[in-house]
């Protein structure tokens, strides 16, 4: 069923990406990694629907998505720039029961994000923190340059917390000064072999562009991770 | 619904009768898979149809290629709301593969290399509606798109067109597959917008 979602806050994550905080009365709740369908209706009745990953764990009727602006996109520029506080869209969901982390599941969690693929993984990181879970989490986040990190301040803060997730960045175009890794695409050497969590068999969540996920998932398999424990979400160049 | 998006115009002019409700056209070919792309060696590739009584019929890769093929041009519709119109494939019709199979089954459960499954009524695999496809757009089917061979059932949402297809299990009763167990619709007709359970 479609529900009315009212924009109550926004946060700019990068020059190209904005988080929308929506108030959705009656929202049934969700797990980190699930997504939501967003529907826009023009005055002539024309409708356009897109699917977005939820960026934050369940918080009563609050739902967060982070939308990357696709320059010639039909929906994303409207969501990032056209929608004002108090405006409404329609949402349906949550959807997806596979690419999800359930607090309490045994085993460490390896998250590998490419670009905007961080969004559903951030929902898992935030869910872990919200429930006070001690499950070992490790995030490897590939972005072109430091300025393109989503949630940068929050991730920096999490990195300083004693029981926070382990964070590592892979910069593909320009690495910060003093970095001991030159800017390059992600490869097997950027990914830890299994057994790092000392907490049972790890589950891997990989999200990013198709080519990124193909490389990462194949590297994880060759490292010895069980393919059945590698969960992947890919988006193509048209994804918005 | 009374919710309008002020100032949203969208691409109403591009509205295309070939698009089912809630779909938009893409010219790319996005990839939706739940896990790693499994490596499938052609020397070991097999495709097996198993009847409800357990009788198996198996084709090797050269045997599949030796069967008469067709080159359907079809529209494909992904549940994540993209559609790709006028895609051209080469493959073997399931009518050919099922021709000599003796079965009373009403349902099929598709199995893939890598463990993926999906279910559909057997009649949706017949009458020129489904193929085991091994070429896309004149080229060998790429691994990320399901190569060496995938099921192609374009009249249902594309998750039914299982990548890396390995076999079909014929069943007397419906048995939900991977996404069907994870909240997606059992049948998945894009024209009736059967995306999720309850649609």
Image: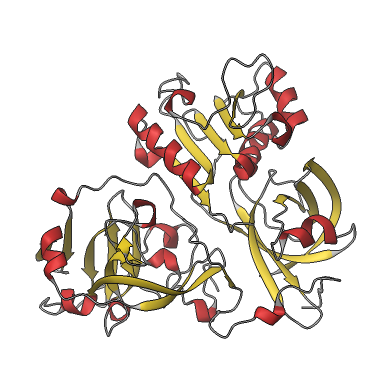
Spot occupied by residue B66 in the image (x, y as percentages of width and height) = 12, 68
Q: Is residue A179 above or below residue B148?
A: above
Q: Nearer the viewer, residue A29 or A33?
A: A33
* Left or right of B56 on screen, residue A121: right
Q: Quadrant of residue B75?
A: bottom left
Quadrant housing the N terminus of chain A:
bottom right
Q: Is residue A212 above or below residue B2?
A: above
Position of the C terminus of chain A by quadrant:
bottom right
Q: Quadrant of residue A152?
A: top right
Residue B117 position within the rendered picture, expressed as x and y whole percent measured from the top left = 33, 58
Image coordinates for residue B46, horizontal then vertical, percent: 16, 56
Q: Is residue B173 visible?
A: no
Residue A59 makes an appearance in the image:
yes
Location of residue A137 (image quadrant): top right
Q: In the image, is A39 to the left or to the right of B135?
A: right
Of B59 and B29, the residue lying toward us: B29
Q: Position of residue B146 (x, y in %)?
A: 34, 57
């Amino acid at each position: 069923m479609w529900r009315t979602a009212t924009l109550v806050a926004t946060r700019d994550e990068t020059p190209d990406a904005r988080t929308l905080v929506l108030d959705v009365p009656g929202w049934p709740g969700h797990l980190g990694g699930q997504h939501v369908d967003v529907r826009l209706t023009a005055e002539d009745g024309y409708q356009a629907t897109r699917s977005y990953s939820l960026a934050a764990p369940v918080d009563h009727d609050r739902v967060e998505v982070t939308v990357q602006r696709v320059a010639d996109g039909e929906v994303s520029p409207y969501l990032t720039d056209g929608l004002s506080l108090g405006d409404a869209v329609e949402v349906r969901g949550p959807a997806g029961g596979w690419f999800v982390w359930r607090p309490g599941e045994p085993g460490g969690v390896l998250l590998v994000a490419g670009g905007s693929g961080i969004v559903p993984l951030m929902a898992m990181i935030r869910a872990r923190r919200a429930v006070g879970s001690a499950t070992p989490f490790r995030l490897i986040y590939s972005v072109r340059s430091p300025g393109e990190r989503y949630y940068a301040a929050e991730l920096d803060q999490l990195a300083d917390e004693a029981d926070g997730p382990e964070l590592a960045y892979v910069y593909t175009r320009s690495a910060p000064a003093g970095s001991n890794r030159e800017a390059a695409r992600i490869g097997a050497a950027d990914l830890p072999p299994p057994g790092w969590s000392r907490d049972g068999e790890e589950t891997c969540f990989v999200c990013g562009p198709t080519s990124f996920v193909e490389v990462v998932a194949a590297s994880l398999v060759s490292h010895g991770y069980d393919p059945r424990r590698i969960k992947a979400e890919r988006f193509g160049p048209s994804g918005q | 619904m009374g919710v309008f998006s002020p100032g949203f115009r969208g691409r109403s002019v591009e509205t295309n009768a070939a698009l089912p409700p809630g779909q938009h056209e893409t010219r790319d070919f996005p990839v939706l898979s739940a896990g790693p792309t499994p490596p499938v060696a052609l020397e070991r590739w097999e495709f097996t149809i198993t009847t409800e009584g357990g009788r198996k019929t198996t084709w090797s890769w050269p045997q599949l290629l030796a069967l008469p093929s067709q080159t359907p041009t079809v529209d494909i519709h992904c549940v994540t709301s993209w559609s790709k119109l006028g895609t051209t494939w080469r493959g073997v019709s399931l009518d050919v593969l099922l021709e000599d199979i003796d079965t009373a089954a009403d349902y099929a459960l598709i199995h893939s290399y890598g463990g993926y499954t999906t279910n559909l009524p057997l009649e949706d695999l017949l009458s020129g509606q489904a193929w085991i496809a091994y070429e896309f757009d004149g080229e060998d089917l790429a691994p990320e798109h399901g190569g060496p061979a995938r099921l192609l059932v374009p009249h249902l949402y594309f998750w039914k067109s299982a990548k890396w297809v390995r076999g079909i299990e014929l069943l007397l009763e419906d048995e939900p597959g991977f996404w069907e167990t994870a909240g997606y619709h059992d049948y998945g007709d894009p024209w009736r917008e059967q995306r999720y359970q309850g649609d």
